[in-house]
Image (tube, rainbow, N blue to C red):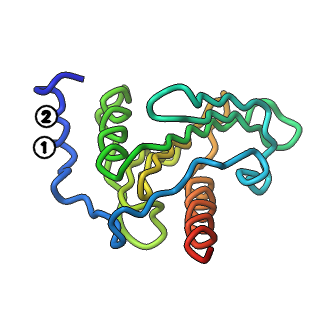
Amino acid sequence: MNAEQKRFLEARYSVKEWPTPRKRGQRVRLSLDCKRLQLRGWTIQREKRDDQATPRSVHLLYWRGESTDELLALDVFECESVKAAHDQLLEILANVESGIVERKTGKGTPGDVAFGLDETMVLFARFNVVVMARNAGPKAVPVLAVARETDAHLMQQVKSESSR
């Protein structure tokens, strides 16, 4: 994105107000494999990893139950720093084709900073990781619980790594 667009997005989404993690330098390694991203009630249909890209990423497609109408896409990006994660989050916001994406705050909000589009898309950053959970099928399903569960996986990984 160009500098003018970035300045516009930083103002629109109040980037200066975004909290930064208490532990500076805290990072999560994207060693998340399918076993760690098993989500209650969802089955992984497809996984695509891109370890050569910057940032590294994994893109997962899940389905629920017997129906192929309920699909969920989960995109996870491992950035080099919190600042890089915030830049990645802005980049994704720039590509979302909706003017009604809003900042999510309050109890139960995943990540250090989060955005959402009703119940159909949640985008958040936790430390140096950015996660986007969104509907990918014809039947709309709420994704906030999935975003919370994914954030819990990230927090558990941080706890595991810091206890070593």
Q: Residue furthest front?
A: 164
Q: Residue furthest right?
A: 66
Q: Is residue 95 above or below residue 110?
A: above
Residue 20 falls left or right of residue 123? left
User: Residue at horizontal 67%, vertical 34%?
Assistant: 139
Marks 2/1: CA–CA distance: 5 Å
- What residue is at 46 percent from the left and 58 percent from the top? 27
Q: Amino acid at mark 2?
A: Phe
Residue 30 in picture, x, y percent from top left: 58, 47
Q: Which mark is residue 11?
A: 1
Callout 2–callout 1 Cβ contact below 8 Å: yes
Instruction: Estimate how packed mark 1 is, as few (under 14), some (14 to 19) or many (20 or more) residues with alpha carbons within 10 Å.
Output: few
Q: Position of residue 80 (x, y in %)?
A: 40, 45
- Residue occupying the point 27% across, 64% down: 19
Task: Determine which of the numbered discs, if any, sits on residue 113 in the image.
Answer: none
Assign a secondary structure to mark 2: helix
What residue sits 79% from the left and 53% below the top?
41
User: Where is 83 relative to 7, above or below?
Assistant: below
Identify the residue under disc 2: 8
Viewer-proximal residue among 31 and 91: 31
User: Can you say which quadrant of the picture contains the N terminus?
Assistant: top left
Q: Nearer the viewer, residue 67 or 94?
A: 94
**Furthest-bottom residue in view?**
163
User: How many numbered dots are placed on residues in this image?
Assistant: 2
Badge 1 amino acid? Ala
**Horizontal placement of 73 versus 11: left or right?**
right
